[in-house]
Each structure stands twice: as C-alpha cells, then as structure tokens.
Amino acid sequence: MSNKFGVFINLDYAHQSHDECAFIWKRIMEIMTGYGFFFQKRTFTIDTDKSRNEIANDVRGLFDLIQKEQEHFFSYVSDSYILNLEDCSDLTLPDTSETIDVENITFQELNIMGIEYDSLIKK
C-alpha cells in the first residue's frame, strides 16, 4: 500500500542569518531529494510503501547526516513535521463538499427528450 507523506521543515530565520539559513537549506534540499523526496508547495513529498514512523526515522537519519557536516544544524531548524498527505486538504482548491451531481445521459435519451446536440463521434 502506497502512502504519500509530506515533510515540512522550517528554518529559524528570526534568529539566524539569512545567508547561513540559505546554505543550510541548500544542503537539506540536496539530502532530501537525494533520498527520493520531491519538493513541491513548501513540502518535501514522497510516495512510499513505508509507514509514517519508518519515514520519520529515515528523515531523522538524514538530519543526523547534516548534523555531522554542520555542527549546529539543529539550531537552524525551528520545527519540522511529517504528515500523511492523503489525510490533508489543500485549502487553495475550491470547496467541493456541495458538488453538483452529474448524471450520465445517453444519445438515445437526448433524442427521446428532443434535445438537439452535435456529436463529435463520426458515424
């Protein structure tokens, strides 16, 4: 069963220099995309058969790799979360909770109702 997870990483721009955060972010991008994550909509996403806990442990391991290179890595990260994106709603998309029901009508039914139409299908 495939799961789609999103990992959100926020750096502490309020207390760290912009240049240092940019350098750290570049390394995070390299490590995360090298592991198989895609970066979209401020989120590192991955489709995987692994569980949330397995992916969380993998990401912690990737963070540890960066920590070995950048001694104060965790002081640049203000917070980081993992979410199952299948359970999330994109609030930028239109609300479809009250959608219009669409009924499939055949050409024969249109003919019976006397509705004129142009078919793109050649007879």
Image (spheres, rainbow, N blue to C red):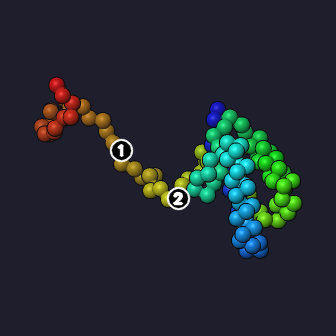
Q: Name the residue under label 1.
A: 101
Q: Nearer the viewer, residue 72 or 47?
A: 72
Identify residue type, mark 1: Asp
Question: Which residue shows up at 47% across the image and 56% down it?
Answer: 93
Vertical side of 81 occupied by 102: above or below: above
Q: Position of residue 54 (x, y in %)?
A: 77, 41
Vertical side of 111 occupied by 14: above or below: below
Q: Position of residue 96 (x, y in %)?
A: 44, 52
- What is the number of the mark on residue 91? 2
Give the quadrant of residue 67.
Answer: bottom right
The C terminus appears in which quarter of the rendering? top left
Visible residue check, residue 84? no
Question: Left or right: where does residue 111 sit relative to residue 88?
Answer: left
Question: Which residue shows up at 75% across the image and 73% down it?
Answer: 17
The Cα–Cα distance between marks 2 and 1, rounded to whole angstroms, is 22 Å
Visible residue check, residue 97? yes
Question: Left or right: where does residue 97 sit relative to residue 53?
Answer: left
The first of marks 2 and 1 along the sequence is 2
